[in-house]
Image (tube, grey):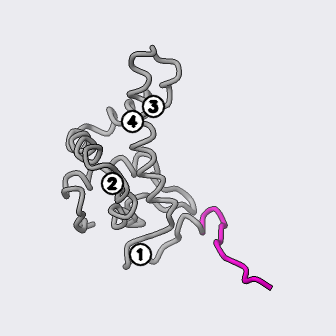
Amino acid sequence: MKLGSSEYFTITQLEAIEKIGDIIVPGSGAFPSFTDTGCIAHIDTVMGPAHEEDLKLLGLLLIVLRYTPPVFIRMLLDLMNKAESMPRFIAPLFRLLNVSLKGIVFSLYYSNLTKESYTGPRPFDAIDYELYCEPDA
């Protein structure tokens, strides 16, 4: 898949988000993978409210993660899940990583937004969820 452009991230950084996204949401059964949906096309919508300095630091982390082997990213994700059992001086860092990396992936994936050319099942289809509003009577 050819990645689009982003106001906040380079192609390398977007590739890192897709890499992490496919580790967290690899797709199975009715669920499409993170990359298959093309939800990365909506990254600027999700990251728009973020503080400029936070975006810069996240960007640096993403560059490192882009070239990190998937096995080490899985280990990092596992450590992030165990943050509460870590010593107090390091736990906040892993909690912050957990919120930021997983938050980006899940916000994009469960936004149900996809790339224009995507025709497969969407996450809402897989969980049998339909969003609608009832008009006032």
Q: Is residue 126 magenta?
A: yes
Pointer 1: what residue?
A: 118
Q: x and y percent of residue 39 in the render?
A: 40, 64
Q: Are there few (<14), some (14-19), or many (20+) residues within 10 Å of tag 1?
A: few
In terms of depth relative to the viewer, which is nearer, 43 or 118?
43
Side (left or right) of 111 relative to 17:
right
**Quadrant of the rendering where the N terminus is positioned:** bottom left
Q: Is residue 11 magenta?
A: no
Pointer 2: what residue?
A: 18
**Residue drawn at 72 percent across, 83 percent down:** 135
- Which of label 4 and label 1 is nearer to you? 4
Chief secondary structure of the magenta span? loop
Q: Is residue 3 visible?
A: yes
Mark 4 in CB contact with mark 1 (< 8 angstroms): no
Question: Which kind of residue does numbered mark 1 sit on?
Answer: Tyr
Q: Which residues are magenta?
A: 125-137
Mark-to-mark CA distance, 1 and 3: 33 Å
**Quadrant of the rendering where the C terminus is positioned:** bottom right
- Which of label 2 and label 3 is nearer to you? 3
**Residue drawn at 37 percent across, 66 percent down:** 42
- Which of label 2 and label 4 is nearer to you? 4
- Which of label 1 and label 3 is nearer to you? 3
Q: Secondary structure at mark 2?
A: helix
Pointer 3: what residue?
A: 95
Question: Which kind of residue does numbered mark 4 sit on?
Answer: Leu
Q: x and y percent of residue 67 in the render?
A: 20, 41
Question: Which kind of residue does numbered mark 2 sit on?
Answer: Glu
Mark-to-mark CA distance, 2 and 1: 16 Å
Mark 3 in CB contact with mark 4 (< 8 angstroms): yes
Pointer 4: what residue?
A: 97
Q: Secondary structure at mark 4?
A: helix
Mark-to-mark CA distance, 2 and 4: 16 Å
